[in-house]
Image (spheres, grey):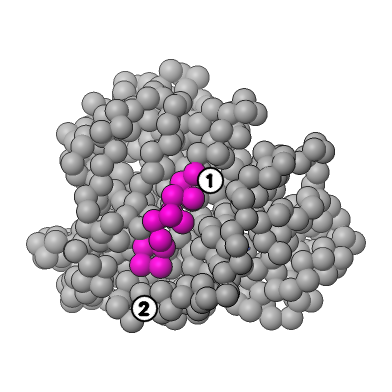
Amino acid sequence: MKFLVVGGGAREHAIAATLVRAEAEIVVASSNANPGLDRLAATAARLDPTDATAVTALARKEKVAAAVIGPEAPLAAGVADALRAAEIPTVGPSKAGAQIETSKLFCRELLKRHGLAVSPRWSAPASVDAVDAAIEEIGGPFVVKPSGLTGGKGVWVQGSDFDDPREGAIYAKSTLIQGGRVLLEEKLDGEEFSQMAFVTDDGVYPMPAVQDYKRALEGDRGGNTGGMGSYSQRDHTLPFLPAADRATAIDILRRTIDALRAEGIGYRGILYGGFMLTARGPVLVEYNARFGDPEGINVLTLYEEGDFADLMYGVATGRVDPNLVQFRLRSTVVKYVVPPGYGDRPRPGGVVELDANAIEAEGVHVFYGSVDAAGPGAVRLSASRGIALVGEASAIHEASTRVETSLRHLTGEFYVRHDVGTKENLAQHVEHMRRLLAPGARPSPLPLSVAPAAAPPSSAGAPDQLIG
Ligand code: AMP
Ligand code: GLY
């Protein structure tokens, strides 16, 4: 089967590699020449992946059986709609469905309209004048979120990105002045996890849960990034995540898809729930309409038993054989090799020499992100995440050690978060959750569902009822 893979990062390299393991043929549509992806491809076309006309023309010319869209930007640009209009089955929601990611305001209002009490307290001040009162109403530490796409880097969290509430207020106001919408949210305390699922016309099929490390520096310091590394655990939960809380998160994904359907928005693709496990259970931080990067790389590494080409074709056409949704019972760790200064002031252009064969021989997989080939065995880093190294083992910390060991096959100037998935780091996450759940500390969980908001969608939503 021939697939079009749209996008040129490490996540798309992993998607293509998983399809190739299922003997699929690959056509790539990306603006960059990804050395790993291009090597796997029968055809690698250089084009703007958000150019719906160009992507569709390529898919037609190559007579692909289906397309898989990796990043959010083509979804936001309606590339999935254009492909479907050209009768090319596509993994990835329509522009309307992708709003769940591309508009944080749409997402919070949708949940509210359908009585899904899974949000922190939030509001969306309609004007600069309303910002101070909205912050006061939250009455504690808060988070400022531009509503639109920001590449995972636009969110400011009090205590990390700013201390003085006035700074947060200025950021919110400047977003409004620039013509964007902004959300103010109560700051949640807990452990974050990503729960992704394949979504078809009649089913939501969960993948293993993953924890992403968003902050640039070890010890969760530094700026918010798209993700520096991530891990998944053998049993598909996480060290701090009880199976029952994961099941709640999966239930929230299902109810959200039902909510979209009730509004006439079908969804074929990947739904990614970013959750915070709090003292009251999982709270929805954000939705994405695609595989996480790096989280998708963790789970794709575990997909070996079934036939990924059949699975992707099934998602694209709206129905899958549930037996195809199988992930091995192993732990995985991804660590991203990034340019020095990444997350704040990246210094691009550094050359990294690597012996990919030696790394693979140690059982660690190499997926290329934002790099250019720089001669045999060398790549040049850009300002973004460069190379994803994936280790797997029985225990998470063993997978982490595998990646660390493989780093001796890389030389050059780069940065890696060594703490991803180490024993000490995992213990800190578990201890954090244990403190929050200490006897007496866990308030009784609130029902997921409350009476749906009676009023039509309002832009300054009253707080949802799960928290506070
Ligand atoms: P988002 O783009 O909504 O995923 O936000 C990026 C990151 O900001 C999340 O992964 C969290 O680490 C943090 N964040 C977002 N919303 C909240 C919240 N309400 N409370 C605490 N942290 C948050
Ligand atoms: N790693 C976070 C994301 O893919 O948005």
The amino acid at mark 2 is Ala
Residue 216 left/right relative to 361 = right
| Quadrant in which the N terminus is drawn | top left
**Image height check: is 295 above or below 81?**
below
Q: Which mark is residue 352?
A: none
Pick whichever, 440 or 135, lies toward us: 440
Q: Which mark is residue 252?
A: 1
Residue 282: give x, y in percent of width and height.
53, 58
- Amino acid carrying mark 1 in the image: Ile
Q: State left or right for residue 216 relative to residue 187.
A: left
Measuring from the top left, give residue 115's x and y in whole percent: 68, 42
Instruction: Give the x, y percent position of residue 9.
Output: 37, 51
**Residue at the location (33% across, 81% down)?**
424
Residue at 43% across / 55% down in the picture?
A: 244
Q: Position of residue 307 (x, y in %)?
A: 21, 34
Q: In the image, which disc is placed on residue 427?
A: 2
In the shown orientation, is residue 107 left or right of residue 328?
A: right
- Provide the secondary structure element on which disc 2 rests: helix
Quarter assignment of residue 150: bottom right
Residue at the extreme right of the image, as rendered: 129
- Decide if residue 203 is in sight here: yes
